[in-house]
Image: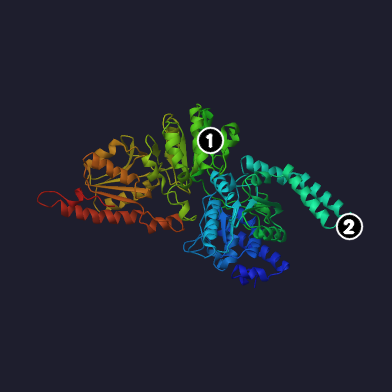
Amino acid sequence: MGILQSIASPDDLRRLDDAQLDALATEIRDVLIRTVATNTGHLGPNLGVVELTLAIHRVFDSPSDRIVFDTGHQSYVHKLVTGRAASFDTLRREGGVSGYPSQAESDHDIVENSHASTALSYADGLAKAYTVRGEDRHVVAVIGDGALTGGMAWEALNNIAIARRSRLVIVVNDNGRSYTPTIGGLANALTALRTNPRYENVLDLVKRRLNAVPGVGPAAYDALHAMKKGLKDALAPQGLFEDLGLKYVGPVDGHDRDAMEHVLAQAKRFDGPVIVHAITRKGYGYDPAERHEADQFHAPGPFDVQTGAEKPKGRIWTDHFADTIVEIGHRRPDVVAITAAMMHPVGLDKFQARFPDRTFDVGIAEQHAATSAAGLALGGLHPVFAVYGTFLNRAFDQVLMDVALHRCGVTFVLDRSGVTGDDGASHNGMWDMSILQVVPGLRLAAPRDATRLDELVNEAVAVDDAPTVVRFPKGPPPADIDAVGRAGGCDVLVRNGTKDVLVVAVGSMATVGVGVAERLVAQGIGVTVVDPRWVKPVDPALVELAREHRLVVSIEDNGETGGCGAVLLQTLNAAGVHTPFRLHGIPQEFLGHAKRDAILERIGLTPQAIALAIVEEMGIVEDMTSFSDGRSPLDVEHTT
């Protein structure tokens, strides 16, 4: 029986001796590697925080003391020592352990916190609440893996600095990385300290010489402390924090559990906010991860445990975008690329390799990225900001007021839009086609396959007087679906039989729409399937097509409320077209983690489910058209 199996709660950690704790750390790394090799997930960040997490849980009393991870993908070790080790093999599987902290899983988790740079704000509020309520509780915020590059973290620090009574310990997990090496001035300052041999060398020299002087006693340590402070003022970045009025402790080796426990205990005794600066290595303890220069196995696909070799996988949507943007870059010297700390995940690494001076990684700072893109556009360039669909939510105000208001030609490429699955509720990109509908002048495209992705990205970067958006899902694209005709700017994918049902299939739902058509035709129902390509603004051709058919059905991989179907229905009503309408999209709920296909089946976004609903609906339409006046309640009641 391993030691990990005996850990039911953090209390059990305090009964272990040093040798047992070292063995436990080795066992935890083995569990992390074997689990992620099969289930996928975030490996590198968690390998780097094993000793750090053990130290936190031995010094602080969770869940009475609250621990918030930023970002939450660093919480696997925390999960293993808070009662979830036995079920950890279900990581990221439907009904299993989430890839992020989860209130539903454990009292030790207070926030999911899967979007970076938010933990300090949560922690600030929690610590203030406990102070106001007179509760004897600490809050620990573990921030790192690039999260300090986000502006929200600094807004929080500005407020934490004046909350003198807050019992808040901020652990800066300084691994020099986010996905790839962390970008920015703060990152450079921390790196300079981490790599500067003078600090430890001079400190060791002073300590040896003072200890060699007989009879000095406590005065020697006082002098050492003063000298250490002077050296750190010259060589370390803590002046940045202390100028804010925050107590700074460190740097300390984050893989030295005993040293971490010592400084955390010191921080715990301080009656106010404290920053503990821990130096760690992403991927620590697993050679293939440490040697993986791109991202230290940040979030690998399935891989061989012994060699670290990732298992072969086909080309995904991101790969096709990567090729397209490089081709555009060769042809258009005014096109520049922006990423928010995800050069490889969004496919801009190839562009960066060819055009390094035209590629900007701004760190985990989506708001800054959007407004900086506006500035680039105002300066005569055409920026392409590639970002996960879920993370664009964070920059909505900048898209609206900084980009669109000034009619800036900026292209936003939204990777992993729609249902993403395994990463859970916060990572589903199901909000973009709703929130972007309200932005005046913005044009939004949703390609159905790789060929249309290439076409639409090229069309998007040709627009220089308004923002454009191209969104696509996670995973491999389907086989190309060729159009059988055109209607305005829309592609007609199926035209079979009489004009009974018009299916408007948005982006990745085009394959679903074609599958629906096959089933309807088999039932003797005539069907037209249209891919709008550009879903905002609504193509006038769709209005005329809707007028000609007996039922309109929209299908989208986006929330039902305010999305493409809702706007199309509104447009039809405004045009006096009252054809019965049915909208199929993602219900407005936070979807639990599962495979994309499993989620789509559960929420009814499959050819079988939609075709069955249409067949039933057509029966209603037949009944209603038999009324003597030819009118139908469906003509005026458009439900989803």
Instruction: Name the residue: 59% across, 31% down.
Output: 357
Instruction: Name the residue: 80% across, 55% down.
Output: 221
| Residue 174 in view of the camera | no
- Identify the amino acid type marked 1: Ala
Would you call the spot at circle 1 few (<14 residues within 10 Å), some (14-19), or many (20 or more)? many
Contact, CB < 8 Å: mark 2 with mark 1? no
Count numbered badges in the picture: 2
| Residue 13 in view of the camera | yes
**Taking 260 as reference, is 355 left or right?**
left
Tag 1 secondary structure: strand
Q: Residue furthest right?
A: 214
Tag 2 secondary structure: loop
Residue 162 against residue 103 in the figure, above or below: above
Residue 250 against residue 346 in the figure, above or below: below
Could you say which quadrant of the image residue 75 lies in? bottom right
Which is more N-terminal, label 1 or label 2?
2
Query: Tell me, what colour scheme is on the image?
Result: rainbow
Q: Which residue has dot 1 on it?
A: 337
Camera-side residue: 427 or 239?
239
Q: Which mark is residue 215?
A: 2
Measured as percent of width and height from the top left, residue 479 is found at 43, 45
- Identify the amino acid type marked 2: Gly
Measured as percent of width and height from the top left, residue 247 is found at 66, 51
Nearer to us of marks 2 and 1 is: 2
Measured as percent of width and height from the top left, residue 230 is found at 76, 45
Measured as percent of width and height from the top left, residue 313 is found at 54, 50
Instruction: Name the residue: 36% across, 48% down.
Output: 556
Camera-side residue: 485 or 152?
152
